[in-house]
């Protein structure tokens, strides 16, 4: 979206002395303001002029005052496609803007992929992606292209993370993780899976509650899920995956592919163990 408030106009659409010298090379007012508009929207939001549906009058007025022309209706520029192309070529040569191609796709993908290993939030990645385009003077492609690029990077980062965790587990550990999704007749609540039992709130502080917490901590400990399995991943990313895993019911894990199921269960149980230990200390302190 093209901003219209005064602060944003000053920030994004104020031309330097060098800019004004280049703009003044053009003869007619419609070409001066047209060239200036192309340069302005390429800087922010970052799309070519031909991608912009409409430019607010306040933006045109702000630019016209700087270059000393009257307000020329945007429809008068360009009257020929060739004019638009020539101005774009000139801007690229003078300012170093580059079109989005295979090389640029790889650069942006690698940047977003690395960020995805730390934070999977789509809005955050989208914002960082746009900033990367602008910082490197890469002309923005269509919005769907950007969305697909971010999705691919997120998907690749998630796959690498899941596969790395999955490959670190033994077959015995995987069997034990699968068993947490089965209904166990010997646990406190009948017709409840082990995972459901582990996630059940502990209730009011009491000696009985402390013993229940100890049983859960001991059960997870017997799975031998080494914390070193996840230590080399970014803590923020692990926290996001933990929060996501806590929202799933046990039956939902059965529908996941193996690498995703085992990875999420590992992250869930390692972090759940920490939470249970913290809760046990809290119960003990209150009882004392």
Image (tube, rainbow, N blue to C red):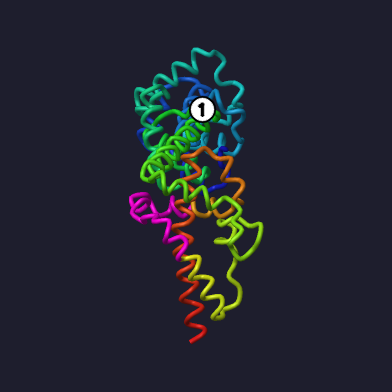
Quadrant containing the N terminus is: top right
Q: Where is residue 135 in the image (x, y as percent from the top left)?
A: 38, 37
* First to last magenta residue range: 218-240
Residue 184: within the magenta?
A: no
**Left or right: 260 as drawn, with respect to 25:** right
Residue most extreme to the front:
186
**Left or right: 3 as drawn, with respect to 225:** right
**Left or right: 3 as drawn, with respect to 25:** right
Q: Is residue 204 above or below residue 12?
A: below
Q: Which residue lies under the disc numbered 1? A: 145
Residue 68 seen in the current view:
no
Residue 237: within the magenta?
A: yes
Q: Position of residue 234 (x, y in %)?
A: 38, 51
Q: Which residue is drawn at 56% across and 36% down?
A: 61
Question: Which is nearer the eye, 236 or 17?
Answer: 236
Question: Which is nearer the eye, 26 or 203?
Answer: 203
Residue 149 seen in the current view:
yes
């Amino acid at each position: 979206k093209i901003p219209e408030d005064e602060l944003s106009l000053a920030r994004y659409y104020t031309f330097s002395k060098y800019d004004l010298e280049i703009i003044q090379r053009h003869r007619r007012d419609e070409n001066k303001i047209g060239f200036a508009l192309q340069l302005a929207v390429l800087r922010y939001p970052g799309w070519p002029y031909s991608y912009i549906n409409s430019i607010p009058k306040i933006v045109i007025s702000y630019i016209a005052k700087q270059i000393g022309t009257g307000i020329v209706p945007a429809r008068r520029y360009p009257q020929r496609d060739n004019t638009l192309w020539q101005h774009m070529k000139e801007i690229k040569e003078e300012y170093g803007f580059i079109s989005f191609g295979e090389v640029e796709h790889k650069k942006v993908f690698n940047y977003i992929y690395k960020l995805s290993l730390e934070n999977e939030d789509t809005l955050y990645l989208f914002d960082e992606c746009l900033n990367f385009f602008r910082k490197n003077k890469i002309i923005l492609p269509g919005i769907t292209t950007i969305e697909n690029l971010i999705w691919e990077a997120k998907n690749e980062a998630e796959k690498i993370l899941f596969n790395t965790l999955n490959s670190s587990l033994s077959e015995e550990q995987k069997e034990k993780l699968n068993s947490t999704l089965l209904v166990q007749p010997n646990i406190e609540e009948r017709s409840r899976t082990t995972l459901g039992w582990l996630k059940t709130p502990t209730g009011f502080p009491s000696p009985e509650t402390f013993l229940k917490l100890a049983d859960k901590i001991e059960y997870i400990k017997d799975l031998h899920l080494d914390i070193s399995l996840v230590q080399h991943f970014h803590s923020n990313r692990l926290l996001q995956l933990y929060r996501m895993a806590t929202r799933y019911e046990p039956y939902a894990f059965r529908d996941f592919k193996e690498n995703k199921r085992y990875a999420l269960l590992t992250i869930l149980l390692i972090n759940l163990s920490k939470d249970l230990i913290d809760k046990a200390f809290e119960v003990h302190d209150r009882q004392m």
